[in-house]
Image: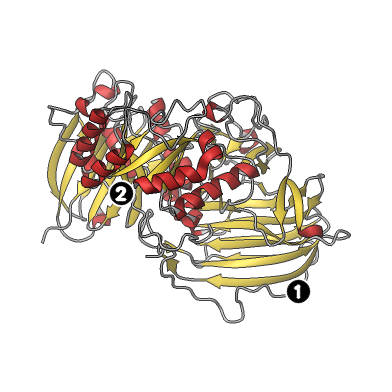
Amino acid sequence: MNGRGPARRGVLAGAGAALLAGPTWAKGEGHEIISPDGRLRLRLSLGAQGPAWSVTRAGKPVLAASPLGLVTADGQRLGPGAHVAGTSRRREGGDWVPPYGIRKRYDQACSELTIEFVQPVSGLRFAVVARAYDHGCAVRYVLRAAPGGALKLKGEATGFVLPPRTVVYASRDEGEYYRTAPADVGPAPHPDLTASSDKEVLADLPVTALVPGAAVLIAESDRLDYPRAMLSAQGGTLVTHMMRYPGRADGYSGPGETPPEESFDFAVGQASPWRVLLVADNEAGLVERADLITTLASPNRLGDVSWIKPGRAVRVRKPYSMAGTMDVIAFAAARKLDYIEFDAHWYGDGTDPSDATRAIPALDMPAIVAAAREKGLGVILYVDRVPVMRQRDAILSTYKAWGVAGIKFGFVWEGRQSDVRFITDLVRACGEHHLLVNLHDNLRPAGLERTYPNYVALEGVRGNEQFPTARHNVTLPFTRAVAGPIDYTICYAHGRNQTTNAHQLAMAAVYYNPLTFLYWYDAPEKYAGKPWPELAWFDACPTTWDETRALAGKIGEYAVVARRSGDRWFLGAMTNEAPRVLKIPLAFLGKGTRRARVFADGDAGAKANQTPVIVSESRLDGSGILTLDLKPSGGQAVLFEAPEV
């Protein structure tokens, strides 16, 4: 498979990809595109304040008329007073096959409308491109002509005017999600902002909005050479804010002041990232629509990606030694994992000019890679951003020569255009060296895993290493996790967990991450000499899927997700601090009786993490109802084997 995958598409006669001249608009007029199923309608209009967009779903408003436009470095807004020079329409059909994902095929059918604008006096030309899919809408800008071939931009005027009675869930950095009104978006960040950060009251993308009759996720896609976007509240409008600083300029990558980028380059022919509205009946439905963000991204640029292997990993922990490493290799092989990972300090302490091509004396990395390979395991190495900036090419060539499978980069900055360029180029270079990439720190997904499929994981989440609440865990499936892979670093059976162990098991199915880290704070001796029958779930659970179903869920309360790999289904259910009993129809299983292995909460313990896991088996089919008895901060995992013949 080349990563682009076979695609079936149908373009309407006379409406190809080329932009065609069309009639101009008068003020107040508009043009509309409709999703293939006819439910979503996106309208572009031109008023005194320039172009605007609005969206309805089944006749009900999802997005009221909201501003569009670019803002130049000197504060001029492109849009007001612009003349329409032409329009074009296009339709695309069919689907495409990702090398891995939440389902086997991704729908790409859509209607597209492009409006060409000319700015009076300056003669600047730009286009607004809009698309309507069954599961959402998106808009972006393309620069057609500018003096000198490029513009200096300060930002965008792209806005989101949500209907009355909308409730928004937003967060910043690795903070908790806050439930608020759109006008009050901008919760306090966690940890505290560093000296070098955007100080405005802002929210990270994605932001989830519950509008009357629907759920909406505001996100971005195809951010390759453009600052990362956040949202600010300006009156009743959520407006995009282009970051001038990295999301969190701290850690080993360079504490202290980091210069802002008050403007950024936008070249003729360049397209901005897509501003995306995912739309579903309810928040559970958003989980099944996450592939739209990937679909909107630029297609694979690496060519053959058959070498990319998603999977599960365990960390080799300090103090490092060859004997300890061999114990982890044996544990990983016994638990049917795919990778071992060396975290910080395997080549130095990370805060000095350590050479990331030389392991500490206690480790013989080529010998470790060879020993792991004999057990069918790959090796992933942590590298801090500082040595990458100094010796990237040497790192990549050395690791390729050693046979390393991938790199986890830590304390990575994302925000400014220079940061985004650094990431895009780094992921590209790793892909050309056949190295997987996992990025950590304050990052947010934007579909880069389609353009460079070796980008298999990223953090950008308040993960399990911070031991968050169960409420936080059942908010993530409908917020941050919808936008892309989520490296949550599951810490199983840890004394600081605020959830049950079954809740931890369920995460492997509820969250999607092609490179899933398990046993984050563990060493092999924790599991030695004990049966741990519930670990059979982790042993079997894949990280990529042929089908995904969101069976039930309510943001901040509970989530039930089922995912299929081959003939087997993996169901994960999680609740917040409230116990609950859920009745789940099993029609998704189809015909035939299946053996179900159930990993459920036992009697509630004094603390959630003291609730035992009860393992049982039963026979179930698609005509039945599954009863989930979830204890406080609890969960359940169910593995449905292939239908019995």
The image shows residue 33, relative to residue 272, as above or below, that is below
- Percent across and percent down for residue 284 are 41, 46
Q: Which residue is mark 2?
A: 562
Answer with the quarter of the image where residue 477 lies: top left
Classify mark 2: helix, strand or loop: strand
Q: Nearer the viewer, residue 604 or 512?
A: 512
Q: Nearer the viewer, residue 293 or 434?
A: 434
- Locate the N terminus by quadrant: bottom left
- Percent across and percent down for residue 252 are 52, 27
The amino acid marked with disc number 2 is Ala
- Percent across and percent down for residue 538 are 24, 40
Q: Nearer the viewer, residue 410 or 120?
A: 410
Residue 526 is left or right of residue 359, and the answer is: left
Marks 2 and 1, the one that precedes in the sequence: 1
Q: Which mark is residue 23?
A: 1
Q: Nearer the viewer, residue 82 or 380?
A: 380
Residue visible at 48% across and 65% down? 108
Classify mark 1: helix, strand or loop: loop
The image shows residue 307, relative to residue 25, as above or below, that is above
- Locate the C terminus by quadrant: bottom left
